[in-house]
Image (tube, grey):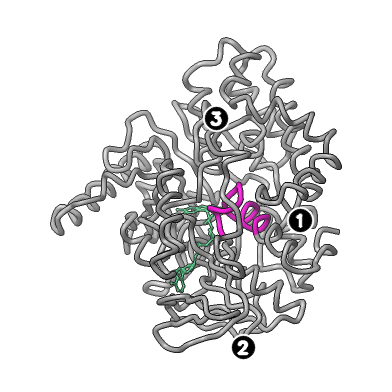
Amino acid sequence: MYDYVIVGSGIGGSLSYAILKKIGRKVALLEKENYLGGCSGTFKRKDFFYNVGATTLVGLDDSMPLGKIIKFLGVEKPPVKKLELPIVVYLDGKVIKRYSDKQKSLEEIAKNFPYKNIESVWKNIYHIAENNWKNVYKLLPINFKNPSLMLKKIATNRRYLLYNLPYQFKSTYKYFKEQIPSIDKTFKDFIDHQILITSQGYSQDVPISVGSMGLTYNNLDNYYVYGGMGKIFDSLIKEKNDVFLRHKVLYVKKMNGYFEIKTNKNVFYAKKVILNKTIWDYAELLEPEYKQKMHRYRKKYPKRWYALTIYFSIEDKNNLIQEHHYQIIHEKTNPYTGSNSFFISLSDYELGEKKSVTISTHCKNEFWENLGKNEYYEQKEKVQEFMFDIMKQYIPAFKECKIENVMVGTPITFERYTQRYSGTVGGIPLIKDYIPFRYPSNFTEIEGLYLVGDSVFPGQGWPGVSLGVLNLLLQLENILEILD
Ligand SMILES: Cc1cc2nc3c(=O)[nH]c(=O)nc-3n(C[C@H](O)[C@H](O)[C@H](O)COP(=O)(O)OP(=O)(O)OC[C@H]3O[C@@H](n4cnc5c(N)ncnc54)[C@H](O)[C@@H]3O)c2cc1C
């Protein structure tokens, strides 16, 4: 009998496994694919390595959640290169370099958006974000279902909470508009699409408290991972005896004081189970009487984005495209996704002078639902053509590169590979409707059954999901020293 069985090896499942192993728990990790990582994994096709979804890595620094976990585990950091220029943004004839260095980054903002007080307004953005990062660990663990815990947290963190309160209830757009009444559409597009990739919402909906963290994402420690994002999981999980790949979990059954977990290959027994599933689909694995709450969640959190990706390789003989990450914000709305921006990430040279590329964009599901087979394949070609045209228009160097091995990943593809509800991307949007009080929690209606992943703790990707894992495990185990 295991102490814990973890279903799914995304960031949430893999970090939970590594921490629980480290403190001596008997734990198994079950993953349906043949690689770890889910949306942050890396898959291989025709000798190229492609990142499934996540391409940017922040937070190996000891002050960040992932850095703290790596320090606690005592494992070596993954093979990475620090990026001085994490993202280059193309927008309305501008090329905005989002440097890691705060002063350089500020100068770039001021150069591209020369409003009179932009520097002081942006400096305050730094301040709000830094304060959040500094205080977040003191707030952990958060559990709105535990009033006495929450009252204690409010009492011990009241200074920070009072400072943060106005920023929690003011939208990012309103914050800027109040201080710079003349902000124009280009600036709004810029902030909208910067925070969309971290918060899953636009500036009028995302509170400035959260928006500030998205706007300063480039100022955190950003890395390129050699060999693809999936390499991180090799660093985190050294001991693979209890990692079971190609094990698709078919059901999780609550028995008398323990759980039975059946996969396509075996049956496991555990005292506790952690599901690395979304709030919209976790109960698909449970018995019918538990599905009601999940259906309620689907109605309660209807605002969600879906993923559309394009994977391909390029031959870039003269290294014309040198940075790893670009964001294009375009005027014409993508007729196959409903989005106005996409993100392009390139690897270093692989296989001689070739690079692997992952493009990703937010997508509305309705564009891909209910299509006939032929229509679906035709639409894949159309979306590729639309996005490649824009890519070549904004970054003409792509015209000089031979493009090969193109694969389009739709929300349907995402659902098939990651099992995420309808191919959802990045969890529940960090918008005023949901945070801070209406966000779901790591705890389910079944005692001993918990959730980790990007829909059960505010924040997605490496920083957000790592925090969510800490939030859960701090309540289940004595691991306070991890926060040191
Ligand atoms: C296109 C895209 C781009 C992104 N870009 C970035 C980025 O640049 N930087 C960043 O930090 N974040 C990024 N994100 C967000 C980030 O990838 C996610 O927030 C994060 O990876 C989610 O982790 P998770 O723990 O929720 O697990 P998931 O990624 O959802 O993984 C769940 C895992 O569980 C497995 N699983 C599910 N059901 C079963 C079952 N029944 N049996 C066995 N296994 C099962 C799946 O196969 C999967 O491996 C991006 C996401 C997407 C989709």
Q: Earlier in the sequence, mark 1 or mark 2?
A: 2
Q: Are marks 1 and 3 in contact (CB under 8 Å)?
A: no
- Magenta part of the protein: which range? 453-468
Residue 79 sits in quarter: bottom right
Residue, disc 2 = 1
* Distance between mark 1 and mark 2 Cα atoms: 36 Å
Say what secondary structure mark 2 lies in. Answer: loop
Residue, disc 1 = 61
The residue at the point 68 percent across, 47 percent down is 84
* Residue type indicated by callout 3: Ile
Query: Where does the image place residue 255, in percent across and percent down from the top left?
Result: 52, 80
Toward the viewer: 331 or 126? Answer: 126
* Distance between mark 2 and mark 3 Cα atoms: 50 Å
The disc placed on residue 191 is: 3
Q: Earlier in the sequence, mark 2 or mark 3?
A: 2
Query: Where does the image place residue 68, in percent across and percent down from the top left?
Result: 77, 61
The residue at the point 70 percent across, 46 percent down is 220
Mark 3 within 8 Å of ligand 1, using the beta carbon: no
Toward the viewer: 172 or 255? Answer: 255
The disc placed on residue 184 is: none
Q: Residues within 10 Å of mark 1 (few under 14, many from 20)?
A: some
